Amino acid sequence: MLRERFLKTRARTQQICSPLKIEDYSVQPMTDASPPKWHLAHTTWFFEQFVLVPYKNEYSEFDKDFAYLFNSYYNNLGDRVLRPNRGLMTRPVVSEVLDYRAHVTDNVAELLAQDDCPDVVHELVELGINHEEQHQELLAYDIKSLFGNQPTFPLYGTVYCLPEEGKAQDYIKVPEGLYEVGYQGEDFHFDIEKGRHKVFLEAFEISNRLVTNGEFLEFIEAGGYTDFNLWHAEGWEFINQHEVRAPLYWHKIKDQWHRYCLEGLVPVNPNEPVMHISFYEAAAYAEWRGLRIPSEFEWEVASKQLDWGILWEWTSSAFLPYPRFEKKPGAVGEYNGKFMINQKVLRGASVATPEGHSRATYRNFFHPHLRWQFAGLRLAR
């Protein structure tokens, strides 16, 4: 079962890249995005360095340089190419990276087929599958960034389109109380979801749907981006420094707003959820409406009554450890723990989240200024 899931995951990553042309694979449109070729190689590097090198007898690395070229942030595993420089690597070429993927995939599959395959390998392959699924979603963000910065706005496909929000605005009431949050169970989960604990919440109400493009457009037209009273000081500085006046990928053409999505440049649909907004923009919009962004615990407690999974949803919560959080020793301990500073938690999932990868306790996290991820906003009061 694990072996089949592994092979399916590996094939899915390459399927996501299949609409690309060879010239697309090495381009890095911004620091936060990585070239598709790098994603293909890094997810392979993970299995090679975490599984094959330590646990497969007589394993021969595909290329010794790849341990350096495709390390992301694991200091325990040595030096690496700086993130902003990933797009400068025209070598190795794409065909070599695909050969690398095949080499590692075959060796991991062979290891998993052995009767004496140790439990630690199963655990690391499970982590590697979930790691690659995270990169499948990042690939969607990065391909959109790549195409969205092209002057002709190329067509990728319709697989990541958003449905319209069909519900009338309403608020779900959640009573005051002591609630338990955090993961409970035996299935796979990340270490940052562990440490189930109690939180006290005052009574609150949370929107039954996401904020739409049409509602956000009202904020724009009311001068929301020019009223400093609505913004955190850091957010006000950011939008002015970077001349932000609308969600990412929005373009005003002949007095009509358009947005780039992976099916091309299209008029803004007022009934779709607004996406590609930073936490700063989400907070300013909530302030303008006289409402607020829910905390991650409010979101989790209310999640059973919500329809979610279209966009990641900003919360007001800082990304911090749960009680009894412990980092594992070595490189695995670098996966999440060292990022618990200056980031905001997002909850839910998006149209780019692989099937089976989401759950109500999942804690995504991004810096508050970032906008290229598939993120939107649900209001609370």
Image: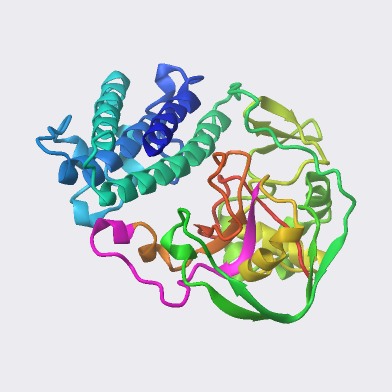
**Stretch in magenta:** 311-334
Instruction: Determine whether, in the image, residue 92 is placed left or right of residue 314.
Output: left
Quadrant of the drawing holding the N terminus: top left
Task: Please name the residue shown 36% across and 34% down the image.
Answer: 3
115 shown above or below 235: above
Magenta stretch contains residue 36: no
| Residue 7 at x, y percent in the picture | 39, 30
275 shown above or below 344: above
Task: Please name the residue shown 53% across and 59% down the image.
Answer: 363
Quadrant of the drawing holding the C terminus: bottom right
| Residue 11 at x, y percent in the picture | 42, 26
Q: How many marks?
A: 0
Task: Please name the residue shown 72% across and 65% down the image.
Answer: 302
306 shown above or below 55: below
| Residue 177 at x, y percent in the picture | 72, 81
Q: Residue furthest left?
A: 58
- In this view, the residue in front, 354 or 248, is 354
Magenta stretch contains residue 312: yes
- In this view, the residue in front, 46 or 105, is 105
Task: Please name the residue shown 59% across and 22% down the image.
Answer: 154
Camera sees residue 212 = yes
- In this view, the residue in front, 128 or 376, is 128
- In this view, the residue in front, 287 or 143, is 143
Give the quadrant of residue 304: bottom right
Q: Residue furthest front?
A: 115
Instruction: Determine whether, in the image, residue 32 is placed left or right of residue 276.
Output: left
Q: How is the image coloured?
A: rainbow
| Residue 282 at x, y percent in the picture | 68, 59
Camera sees residue 236 = no
